[in-house]
Amino acid sequence: MTSEGKPLGWTPRDERDHFIRCPVCGETLDMRDLAQVIDHLHGQDVEEEPTIQ
């Protein structure tokens, strides 16, 4: 059984599993916060998935 919005097969061991260090600036960010993730793109383009028309 799956839960909406939950990754399959991965469970964090503790709160630290949700944080990474940005390889560009070295700041720690919470991967659960999309705004923080987008702020750390540092000008990189994000490819969009193609839509079916």
Image (cartoon, rainbow, N blue to C red):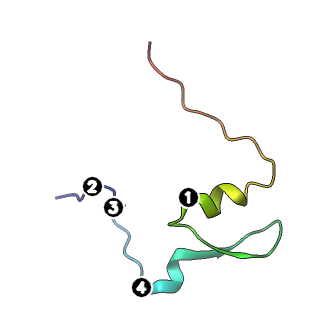
Residue 6's mark? 3
Secondary structure at badge 2 equals loop
| Front tag of 3 and 1 | 1
Secondary structure at badge 1 equals helix
- Sequence-first disc among 1 and 4: 4
Q: Quadrant of residue 37?
A: bottom right
Amino acid under disc 4: Arg
Left or right placement of residue 12 versus residue 40 in this view: left
Q: Residue at x 55, y 58 (%)?
A: 34
Q: Residue 31 appears at what percent x and percent y?
A: 56, 67
Q: Residue furthest top?
A: 53
Q: Residue furthest front?
A: 35
Residue 13's mark? 4
Q: Residue at x 83, y 70 (%)?
A: 25
Left or right placement of residue 8 versus residue 12 in this view: left
Q: Are there few (<14), some (14-19), or many (20+) residues within 10 Å of tag 1?
A: few
Report, in whole angstroms, how far the alpha carbon at label 4 lies from the one at label 2: 20 Å
Q: Residue at x 22, y 57 (%)?
A: 2
Report, in whole angstroms, how far the alpha carbon at label 4 lies from the one at label 3: 15 Å
Q: Residue 28 appears at what percent x and percent y?
A: 69, 77
| Front tag of 1 and 4 | 1
